[in-house]
Image (tube, grey):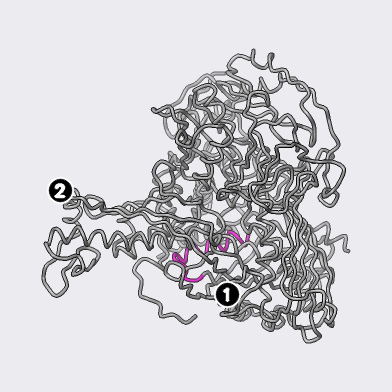
Amino acid sequence: MKLDLTLNGRAVSDDVRPDLTLLEFLREHGCLSVKQGCGTANCGLCTVLLDDVPVLSCSVLAVRANGRAVVTLEGLQEEASAFVGFLADQGADQCGFCNPGMVMNTIALLRENPDPSDDEIRAYLAGNLCRCSGYEGQLRGIRAYLDSRKE
Amino acid sequence: MAQPQKDYKCVGKSIRKKDAMQLLLGKAVYMDDIVPRDALTVKLLRSPHPNAIVEEIDVSLACKVPGVVAVYTWQDVPRQRFAIAGQTYPEPSPYDRLILDRHVRFAGDPVAIIAAEDERAALGAMKRIKVTYRVLEPVLDPRASKDGPILVHPEEDWYPPCPVGGDNKRNLVASETDSAGDVDGVLDRCDIVLDRTYHTKAFQQAMMETFRTYTRLDRYGRLHVISSTQIVFHVRRILSAALGIPKSKIRVEKPRIGGGFGAKQTAVSELYPAFVTLKTGRPAQLIFTREECQIAGSPRHEMEIRVRLGADKTGKIRALDLYTLSNSGAYGEHGPTTVGLSGHKSIPLYTGSLEAYRFAFDVVYTNLQPAGAYRGYGATQGIFAVESAVNELAELLHIDPTVLREKNMVRQGMAMPAYYGETAGACALDRCLARCKEIFDWEHRYPVRDLGNGKVRAAGVAIAMQGSGISQIDVGSATIRLGDDGCYNLILGAADMGTGCDTILAQMAAECMDCDVDNVAVFSADTDVSPYDSGSYASSTTYVTGKAVERACEELKERLCRIAARVLACPPEELTFCGNCIRRCGTEQSVSLHDLAYQAQLNNTEAAEATVSHSSPISPPPFMAGMAEIELDKLTGQVTVLDYMAVVDCGTPINPALARIQAEGGIVQGIGMTLLEDVRYDAHGKPMETSLMQYKLPTRLDMGKLRVEFESSYEPTGPFGAKSIGEIVINTPAPAIAHAIYRATGVWHRNLPITAEQIALGP
């Protein structure tokens, strides 16, 4: 099927199988930050923005992105750089495999709600699993970033 | 131990992991990101039966699927048995595997290897392989395995490289009895003897990156393996044995890996693409699906542990008698060794007053998913049992369980007969417990509080230990090399799987060489390049490899002084290494490190690098105390962990931020296996929790406050006084939360996980 979309601000056209997932499409197009963790929409690793809304790309067909804008972490390096250093300071990156999905969802959260409470952060990121960190370090990192903005 | 804390520049500092920004910004660092896209896709047809013989297998239709390159069956593979456990040779694990076996032994055991141009073709071929199975009755209950009528490994070429008490004709992977003192006599004389049986399941590591391996032939025609593994050197040996090719023809490399927790201490995914590459000459890759990870990974050994605990009326614990039945599943990986920890790293916690102990075990085969190594490695199961029994004793005697532990626990300087006779050289367990009590506010939170709205708040406690590497076996090595402008390369065979050991070991090197951590470039791990390291497991890296780093730096400094002696035309004994220069004592003469680095490249015969291997005769245990406060809904059985407080003695924390994250992550994994993660089997012995939809990992909503503190001791045999932290941190949640649930409900739950349903249903 013919597919035209905007990927990280760039027009992309391709002919794809109807059952190709957006996750597969994105990795084939060099967006290697997008990871598969479960394949059943349970882990959050494959989170990308589809028309600015976070979606799990393992469970979205690539053709559903036709005519729409997809953004991956490759396209948000600057916005991410603003706060991921605070996560690094906590050592919260750990194995790193869940990081891109979590960073994408955090970006979505902060765009929606620039000053979230700890509970709001936990609730918004609840679908982003991390097996290494126990989550607290990620929360401390995001909190430190938010506090730094208030100073 | 009160040790003068030196004013370190790099050690003890919470610096960022060297790869942190690459990881957080989603750069391509993992196997699937860095390998070429044109590799063959490898898929495995897996048996639906837990015990069957492949009578006939017809691959002709499968081979006709466009894009299919090859399909291999048991007839195509070498007939020499081997083990896939990542252990030092000769492995304690039995040689009971073939790459493909005609006798399939669990639902998920591979029957055929498919290699195709893409995944679609491979999956299309999988459907077209015709297999006729002779289905045999399986043994699915570990209690019925030993000396039962059904043999999991009846084959004549089953081979144990080490004498560990195994016998395939009895379904035994291993068995042993160890004791000190007259256990039966002491138990007879005790005022109270508790006799309790505890059970834990085959929990999954569920690292976010599933098992995966890429293989190709390099420019010399050698097999080049890029795999998500904790054990590059063991993988090379395993591949050599399995494929029947010399080790000189194999190179194994690990990229950044997306979590391991012990799962990748077994060569789960490496054999199949390697076999395809050798046969076809083409690059190949195998990426496990999450379902394959859940049904054919290398989870924790299911254990049933009977504890007989003898005490007097005052709560003095006089005897411990443990029997562990461990379920190794269809193959014996790590079976003989995990089980040992269930006793040897639980009983010594009560060295304080113990007069006698006995620890016996059987490890049995069943037709279930083979188990492997998972953080804690048997200690987790044993500590759940022993700590629960101790809590049961405290409640029976109406003694505060922290006070009971103060009476009985191991303290610094005590010899621990149940811990291989080692002495607790550096042990701050007493301080950990005292501090934990204080910060947690145990006095006020231990009493049960009924909130009057159907909810109850209660608290529980546990202590734990682990080891630091495998004594007299593990080898850690480091190469440190001076580069052109005074920078250093630190080359390792350890495997940073997210723990941060690349950074921690660089901190040690920077401390020794008196430079910035940024000045130390780290590389790990590649069998062609790295000095030998057994790998990152058994909580060994900080303690064993760290000491190798420290010693390699000392040796490099001596070498640099010898090079400087030539430059300054003086005896090397008169020279002192000062970080950025080498100085001649009592003179103004010196040579800068920058100049020395160039001098080392000019008419020089002394290598400006040093490689040191280290091994330790002892394995100093880290210790910790953990306390949990829960809120329990009496109607639904729902348990919410409100607050978890842990105080850890890992010796000197080399990087406190990373040590803290290790502790927090381990505690949350422990909470998962206590309350959420279940493993049930269908009639075919296949796990029912085959996805992350069913296998419930803790989310950030499943935990309340999590607090971690350190009570440092100083371990003189470790680098900068360090012990270990990676594994111990998973050990306290199960017994502490089970204790809190008892406090809230009056029911002891002795089987993990303790789900809301079980609590609501009651005893």
Query: Could you say whether the residue bearing mark 1 is in a helix, strand or loop?
Result: loop
Q: Give residue A72's position: percent from left, percent from top.
A: 48, 38
Q: Nearer the viewer, residue B354 or B523?
A: B354
Taking B32 as reference, is B403 above or below it? below
Q: CA distance from mark 1 to mark 2?
A: 51 Å
SS class, disc 2:
loop
| Residue B516 position (above or below residue B102) | below
Q: Residue at x 49, y 58 (%)?
A: B541
Q: Answer yes or no: are tags 1 and 2 on the same subunit.
A: yes
Q: Is residue A127 left or right of residue B132?
A: left
Residue type marked 2: Asn
Where are the magenta residues, as a range? B651-668
* Residue type, label 1: Thr
Q: Is residue B753 visible?
A: no
Label the magenta part by its dominant secondary structure: helix
Q: Pick the quarter of the image with the C terminus of chain B.
A: bottom right
Q: Nearer the viewer, residue B315 or B643?
A: B315
Residue position marked by numbered label 1 in the rendering: B423
* Front residue (pair B138, B171): B171
Residue located beneath label 2 in the image: B603
Q: Position of residue B323 (x, y in %)?
A: 78, 63
The structure residue drawn at horizontal position 51% and vertical position 67%, both measured from the top left corner, is: B723
